[in-house]
Amino acid sequence: MGERYSLLRQRYPSFLIHDSVLNMEVPQVPRGEIAVYYRPVDALARLIGEAKPDEAEKRAVDFASLIRDCSGVSASNLGVSGSIKIGLHTPSSDIDLIVYGRNESTLVREAMKHLLSEGNPVRHHHPDELERLYHFRVADTKMPYDQFAQHEARKTFQGIYRDREFFIRYLPNSSEIGEAYGDIQYHTEGYVKIKALVSDASESFYTPCRYRLTQVEVLDGPVASDIVEAVSFRGRFCEQAETGETVVLQGKLEWVITAAGSHRWVLLGGTPSDSMISLSLLNTQK
């Protein structure tokens, strides 16, 4: 993320603004500067109708079709993202899919669990593939390899379809979010490391992923008695822990203010030092 912000500062400094709602610097492109808007659902529909798709496009369509058939979800709730969406892919590009809707996401996730358990044509990463993934991510999210491997091995939104790496992002529909921009205010209160029990991980596979926390113990950083959840907009923190597991995590402590009241959460994914480790998972695999 640091490289992206540096590039924007060099070439498009006007695209970086301080957002008063998020209370942080974020990229924001003025509407008048947007030439094309790429919708993942439209991109997938275009690829399905392509008369002569290349190999990467064909793999993406085949994978989306497999998910549709196994889950019963309509193609209108599926989209393709990443380089394939905008035609900047290479023959070896991976497959980035998006699933829209809470119910649809649950159905696809269950289908993925089944497909991965069968191991063909969808499977988890082999050790050498997992090591490559680790080296790709470690610069942005630092974690010892053995811990990384144990956490990634049970995730169901990523893996290999035939010979192609894939990543699935689950998004609620806009009508299911229940809030508008500006309804919630966020105030940074420092950096914190905590130990906690995950009381509810039912939203751990969405973007943003969310972990409800209880029995919170502050190990380092500002002392706060009302930290009730950990949240991340980064896909790498999805399915990082399960309900009932004890975790140690560190990230940005934010005071979250809503019309109904306020609480604090830990936001993960802003810096390479941010992490979430399931002690329960590590202990069971010793």
Image (spheres, helix red, strand yellow):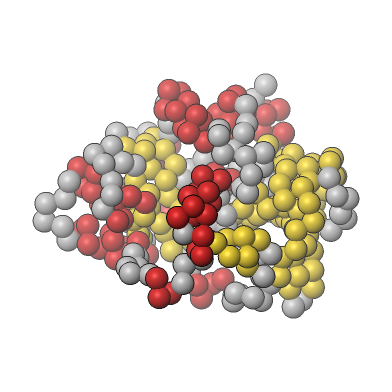
Q: Seen from this angle, which residue lies furthest left? A: 51
Q: How many labels does the image show?
A: 0
Q: Height in image: 129 above or below 252?
A: above
- Residue drawn at x 55%, y 62% as measured from the top left: 16
Where is residue 250? Give x, y as percent.
73, 43
Tell me which corner region of the image, top left, top right, bottom left or bottom right, holds residue 242. Answer: top right
Where is residue 261? Give x, y as percent.
79, 73
Q: Seen from this angle, which residue lies furthest front? A: 10
Q: Height in image: 268 above or below 117?
A: below
Going by the image, does 34 lie left or right of 141? left
Going by the image, does 262 lie left or right of 276? right
- Residue drawn at x 48%, y 33% as measured from the top left: 136
Please identify the quadrant where the C terminus is shown.
Answer: top right
- Residue drawn at x 46%, y 72% as measured from the top left: 30
Residue 195 seen in this snapshot: yes
- Residue drawn at x 75%, y 63% as measured from the top left: 187
Going by the image, does 262 lie left or right of 27? right
Tell me which corner region of the image, top left, top right, bottom left or bottom right, holds residue 285. Answer: top right
Where is residue 99? Give x, y as percent.
42, 59
Residue 153 seen in this snapshot: no
Q: Height in image: 184 above or below 109?
A: below
Where is residue 75? Give x, y as percent.
31, 63
